[in-house]
Amino acid sequence: MGPDRFSPGRAAGDLPGLLKRYVRQETVEPLRAAGRFLVFGLLGAFFLGLGVVLLAVGGLRGLQSSGLLDGSWSWVSYLAPAAVLTGVAAITVSRIGGRKNLDG
C-alpha cells in the first residue's frame, strides 16, 4: 500500500499551507474588503459633495442672470445658495450617528 494519508510526516507538511490559508482567510481578505468599502465610500462622498457644490453655483448663476435681483437686492442671490448649502449640511450632520434600537 502507499503512504497513509494520516501519517505524521504528511500532517507536518500540510501544517504550513493550512496556517497560511487560515491567516489569509481571517486577516487579508477582511482587510481587503474593508479597504474597498472605504475607497468607494470616500469616492462617493467626494462626488456627492462636488455635485452639491456645482448645483449651488449653478443656482447662484441662474439667480444672477435672471435679472430679478439687481441693484440693492443683488446680495440675495448669494444668500439663497448659502442657505440651501447650510440646510443640506444640517440635514447631513443630523443623520450622522448610529441607528437607535427600536426594540426598547
Image (cartoon, rainbow, N blue to C red):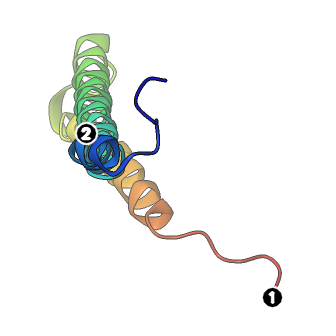
Residue 98: percent from the left, percent from the top?
52, 70
On residue 5, the disc is: none
User: At 46% across and 57% down in the image, what residue appears?
Assistant: 91
User: At 38% across and 44% down in the image, what residue appears?
Assistant: 84
The secondary structure type at the circle numbered 1 is: loop
Q: Nearer the viewer, residue 5 or 35?
A: 5
Q: Residues within 10 Å of mark 1 (few under 14, many from 20)?
A: few
- Identify whether 97 is placed above or below 13: below
- Identify whether 78 is placed above or below 91: above
User: At 20% across and 38% down in the image, what residue appears?
Assistant: 78
Question: Where on the picture, by quarter, is residue 48?
Answer: top left
Tag 1: amino acid: Gly
On residue 17, the disc is: 2
User: At 81% across and 88% down in the image, what residue appears?
Assistant: 104
Q: Nearer the viewer, residue 54 or 95?
A: 95
Residue 38: percent from the left, percent from the top?
27, 42
Residue furthest front in the image: 1
Residue 87: percent from the left, percent from the top?
41, 53
Q: Nearer the viewer, residue 60 or 85?
A: 85
Residue 82 seen in this snapshot: no
Q: Nearer the viewer, residue 61 or 47?
A: 47
The residue singled out by tag 1 in the image is: 104
Sooner in the amino-acid sequence: mark 1 or mark 2: 2
Q: Which callout, 1 or 2, points to the residue nearer the camera?
A: 2
Q: Residues within 10 Å of mark 2 (few under 14, many from 20)?
A: few
Residue 24 seen in this snapshot: yes
Tag 2: amino acid: Gly
The secondary structure type at the circle numbered 2 is: helix
